[in-house]
Amino acid sequence: MPIGALASWGISHPGAVHLNASSSALIEAAVRRGEGVLTDAGSFAAFTGTRTGRSPKDKFIVREPGVADQIDWIANQPMAPAMFQRLRDQIRAYLQNRELFTFEGYAAADPRHQLKLRIVAEKAWHALFARCLFLRTPAEGSTAADSEPWTILHACDFHCDPARDGTNSEVCVAISFGEKLVLVAGTHYAGEIKKSIFSVLNYLLPQRDVFPMHCSANIGANGDTALFFGLSGTGKTTLSADPDRRLIGDDEHGWGPDGVFNIEGGCYAKTIKLSERGEPQIWNALRFGSVLENVPIDPVSHVPDFFSTQYTENTRAAYPIEFIPRCELSGRGGHPTNIFFLTYDAFGVLPPLSRLSPDLAMEHFLLGYTAKVAGTETGITEPTIEFSTCFAKPFLPLPPKRYAALLKAKLEQFRVPVWLVNTGLNGSGSRMSLEHTRALLKAALSGALNDVPMVTDPIFGVQIPTTCSGVPANILSPKSSWPTPAAYDAQANKLLALFKEKAKAYA
């Protein structure tokens, strides 16, 4: 690549530049440079050091004209334009004379809303991660190829100085809508790459009356599309990877006039306690071309230890979506016929599955109740109660009611049933059985629950099915798993009080 080819990106004197290198070339370079190792199955295993999850306290949006009056500054940290420009110039200077790895691709499978991307990274494996996670070719009919791309400058070994740069730590993730530029500095955690682009689209898509969603999606044999909303660790990737349905995507989607479309071209799955029996599709996707993040690897056999928390519980795998058998390669599906809100209930009082009225659906969407699972963010070491607005609080530039209005309009137009699924704890303190959760989802998706009698939970108002094939009756009612009814009532009312207090903000 010519020396001056990066000049327009602000890097006038780069070292060797690898533009859109193949997965094989990137893996070869990463091994050569000592960035990680290959596993026995061929995955590239990398380690991210002290930052093994996202750093939400280090994320900023530049307060720019034309943007500042739209951003929800209660939930987002502002950065002054001059401060961003100084940091940008420092990172550009840092990247001079370095070997660089670039990826050019796309986000959003819908051609009308596709975004052209460019990632410039100092590590080969971060370019490989981008190659796994984003679309590598434009959708048919897309005009994105002719547009100015969004650029991510990824300088993982550049450490910010809070006194000099105005940051909160050595890490910074800063988004400039005016410059169409994202700076990621001081962290090796690859999830910041994908989530920064999701944040960008969470700003852009609502302006086109498209609903951006933190959800996975799949499609059945009859063309029925299902959505699975939830924070990291609640089961989006696991539950949407269904051998009887085609995977559209595992984490980020848009819902437009023609239906649902995937924002990404790959998957980013949690791998803690991963087994071939429990999650065969994900297990088989971890082959050459995929990336493992912070999974301990045996130094002799190179076999990954998916049950180890040596580095973090937030162990991850990134792989192209085509590594999942029978995936939906178009990245698109029709309007949803079922929506599932996944929550990790750390109180152990919500039923494994219940149906929500339209009003309750909007309430739960705005509340976004769950628990942050250990490791997903820096400093989280055990399940922690969280109200993540719209199941996507860290990635929402706009006020929450903007997204709620989009969901409400879709639910009213298409009359989609909404189900609340507890993938967290039951009354005994054990996690809900994956086998039972899958059986309940299968029943809801097939329509088998349509004629099943429902009982109204007296505390939460949700509708609980009385029977479901493959699930013991005592599992369906959460009170049955508690030592005493009184203990259940006390804990359930405690959670209800939290719901009511939090809901005041959206009254």
Image (cartoon, rainbow, N blue to C red):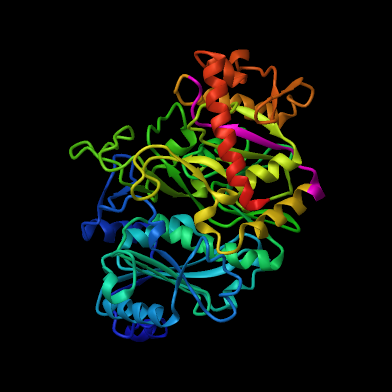
Q: Quadrant of the N terminus?
A: bottom left
Q: Nearer the viewer, residue 408 or 500?
A: 500
Q: Nearer the viewer, residue 116 or 65?
A: 65
How far from the left and from the top, in percent, is residue 457?
A: 68, 25
Q: Nearer the viewer, residue 31 or 419?
A: 419
> In the image, what residue occupies the spot 61% across and 71% down?
70
Give the vertical position of 186 relative to 442 (above or below): below
Residue stretch in magenta: 412-427
How far from the left and from the top, in percent, is residue 48?
A: 29, 53
Q: Can see residue 99?
A: no
User: Image quarter for residue 220?
Assistant: top right
Give the vertical position of 443 relative to 467 (above or below): below
Residue 192 shown left or right of residue 358 in the figure:
left
Give the vertical position of 480 relative to 297 (above or below): above
> In the image, what residue occupies the spot 57% across and 27% down?
492
> In the image, what residue occupies the spot 38% across and 56% down?
55
Is residue 345 magenta-colored?
A: no
Is residue 426 magenta-colored?
A: yes
User: Image quarter for residue 473?
Assistant: top right
> In the image, what residue occupies the spot 41% across and 55% down?
191
How far from the left and from the top, in percent, is residue 177?
A: 53, 75
Q: Can see residue 442?
A: yes
How far from the left and from the top, in percent, is residue 423?
A: 53, 31
Q: Count numbered badges in the picture.
A: 0
Q: Nearer the viewer, residue 92 or 398?
A: 398
User: Image quarter for residue 469?
Assistant: top right
Residue 452 shown left or right of residue 100 in the figure:
right
Among all residues in the image, which is located at the extreme left?
Answer: 300
